[in-house]
Amino acid sequence: MGSRRKTEYNIVILGALGVGKSALTVKYMTKRFIMEYDPFIEDIYTKHEGVESQDFFVNVMDTFEKDDSNSQRYFRWADAYMIVYSITDRTSFETAKDYTCKVSDYLKNANKECPIALVGNKSDLERYRQVSKSDGQTLCTDHCGLFFECTAAEDYECVEDVFHGLVHAIQKSRGDRSLVYSPLFISEDRVHAGQKARPRSPKNSTDKKDDIKQANKKNPSSFKLFNKSFKIFN
Ligand SMILES: Nc1nc2c(ncn2[C@@H]2O[C@H](COP(=O)(O)OP(=O)(O)OP(=O)(O)O)[C@@H](O)[C@H]2O)c(=O)[nH]1
């Protein structure tokens, strides 16, 4: 295990019930969108990435919190935090606020620096929007380094962008060689999936497919799902 593990990045996903934490995790892992699953299971998933001649593992902890009593499990583990709300649910934004304060306080007290991304999910449901983009940006300015709106239900790229944004931020904070990272949607006005705010990095989609094939060839178990029971839709 020790020798197999190269560079690893641990990302914890936090947020209210039903905001799409699992949907974002599974989209990143498999490029697919899940509709149903058992919400009461907390798991860690691993994806092996081969991007831009870099070889690394991204571990994602998809949390389920019954109460507030056991936050140490992820505080100790995390290299970065993804705090998710649904743009269609104001209450989930308030929960995200609580999480950003809680994580910021922990980091301050522990004298640690970890990247935090605030993510407004379900941007495909614009017509039901209850949280404005500027509210998200303001919360981000106060507490987080990165802000995204995205959707797990449509383009894979916007979800990959969020994860790679955090990987890039961890790499920078550790002084590792970092990914060339040109965000699609950070703090810009164009947020809906499928509308690319600016051209992607030099790689085209064929290159990316090749990267994934390569990664899978090198490590057939590059994606590990443990005990969630999902229904997965393409
Ligand atoms: N339209 C749309 N639906 C989504 C999106 N993300 C998740 N959903 C749906 O929202 C519901 C909840 O998503 P989950 O991924 O289970 O949310 P969660 O945050 O993991 O929920 P818990 O594990 O219960 O805390 C599911 O029915 C998903 O299919 C999205 O981006 N767009």
Image (cartoon, rainbow, N blue to C red):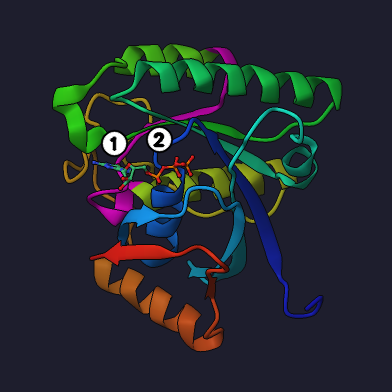
Q: In screen coordinates, is 203 left or right of 28?
A: left
Report if the beta carbon of the residue with label 2 is closer than 8 angstroms to ligand 1.
Answer: yes
Q: Say few, some or many: other residues with alpha carbon within 10 Å of mark 2 (under 14 / 14 to 19 / 20 or more).
A: many
Is 180 situated left or right of 35 in this image?
right
Residue 172 or residue 158, whichever sits in front = 158
Ligand 1's quadrant = top left
Question: What secondary structure is marked by label 1?
Answer: loop
Q: Nearer the viewer, residue 71 or 143?
A: 71
Residue 151 to residue 160: above or below: above
Q: Which circle's residue, 1 or 2, is located before the other in the chain?
A: 2
Q: Is residue 44 visible?
A: yes
Q: Label 1 to label 2, Cα distance in Å? A: 8 Å
Q: Residue at 41% across / 75% down in the picture?
A: 212
* Contact between labelled residues 2 and 1, with CB atoms less than 8 Å apart: yes
Q: Position of residue 42 (x, y in %)?
A: 60, 51
Residue under label 1, please give it.
122
Between 182 and 218, the one nearer to me in the picture = 218
On the rendered structure, is 78 left or right of 116? right
Residue at 70% x, 41% y is 173
Front residue (pair 178, 189)? 189
Task: Say if disc 1 is inside 8 Å of ligand 1.
Answer: yes
Expressed as whole percent of the image width and height from the top left, the position of residue 149 reads: 34, 32
Span highlighted in magenta in the image: 142-158
Residue behind mark 2:
19
Quadrant hosting residue 48: bottom right
In magenta segment, residue 157: yes
Quadrant containing the C terminus is: bottom left
Image side of residue 78 versus residue 197, left or right? right
